Image (tube, helix red, strand yellow):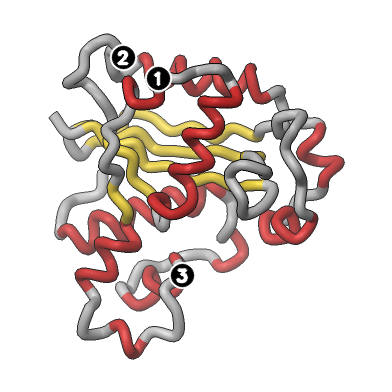
Amino acid sequence: MAKLFFYDLETTGLDHERNGIHQISGVIEIDGVVRGEFNYKVKPHYNDQIDPKALDISGVSKDDIMKYPDIREVYSQIIGVIGSYINKYDSLDKFHLVGYNNRGFDDKFFRQFFHKNLDKFFGSYFWSDSVDVMVLASNNLLEQRPMLENFKLSTVASHLGILFDEEKLHDALYDVKLTRDIYHKINNTSCN
């Protein structure tokens, strides 16, 4: 049984040790069928630094994110979602993390999110070898890569003929759904 945890984050900066998450969204897919989705706004941890340039990308302000639900409340909700689909005490029952450029970015922030909530058991929920759709797309588009201006999510989607709304980019839930579309397109699998 393939359990995929498609996810994306919006953060308060680029350094997973100094900055934090202000939005986390995802789609739960099990054996090719969407079983659920989530979209949480998160008030950063009190130690998190906030880079205004990072917030500009997401189109939010510091005042906005400081009104979001507390990090511990959101953590509890995410654990509830995860626990609906896996048994963290079964070492063979875990999600595959799937994202776009997640290995180099999102995975580090997501692990830190667990750490900030005093949870040392990230590996009880997720396999360590996450799936990076950017890497999959890179392998799939090796010969076409020189024709692409860059390898951003929107550029790859456009090159693959996947329609998207430019105005909605950098909203974590929208980006997750676009990542999922790319994943299924390059794997030639159905996207239910």
Marking on residue 121: 1
Q: Is residue 146 left or right of residue 49?
A: left
Q: Earlier in the sequence, mark 3 or mark 2?
A: 2
Count of marks placed on residues: 3
- Looking at the image, the residue that sits furthest to the top is 89
Q: Residue at x 31, y 14 (%)?
A: 88
* Viewer-side residue, 19 vs 70: 19
Amino acid, disc 1: Phe
Q: Is residue 176 left or right of residue 13?
A: left
What separation in Å lies between label 3 and label 1 (alpha carbons)? 31 Å
Q: Earlier in the sequence, mark 2 or mark 1?
A: 2
What separation in Å lies between label 3 and label 2 (alpha carbons)? 34 Å
Q: Residue at x 28, y 18 (%)?
A: 86
Quadrant of residue 9 within the rendered picture = top right
* Residue carrying label 3: 152
* Viewport quadrant of the N terminus: top left
Amino acid, disc 3: Lys
- How packed is label 3: few (under 14 Cα within 10 Å), some, or many (20 or more)? few
- The image position of residue 163, as x and y in percent, is 41, 68
* Residue carrying label 2: 88
* Viewport quadrant of the C terminus: top left
Quadrant of residue 95 within the rendered picture = top left
Q: Earlier in the sequence, mark 3 or mark 1?
A: 1
* Viewer-side residue, 86 vs 130: 130
- The image position of residue 65, as x and y in percent, is 76, 38
Q: Residue at x 24, y 32 (%)?
A: 3
What separation in Å lies between label 2 and label 1 (alpha carbons)? 9 Å
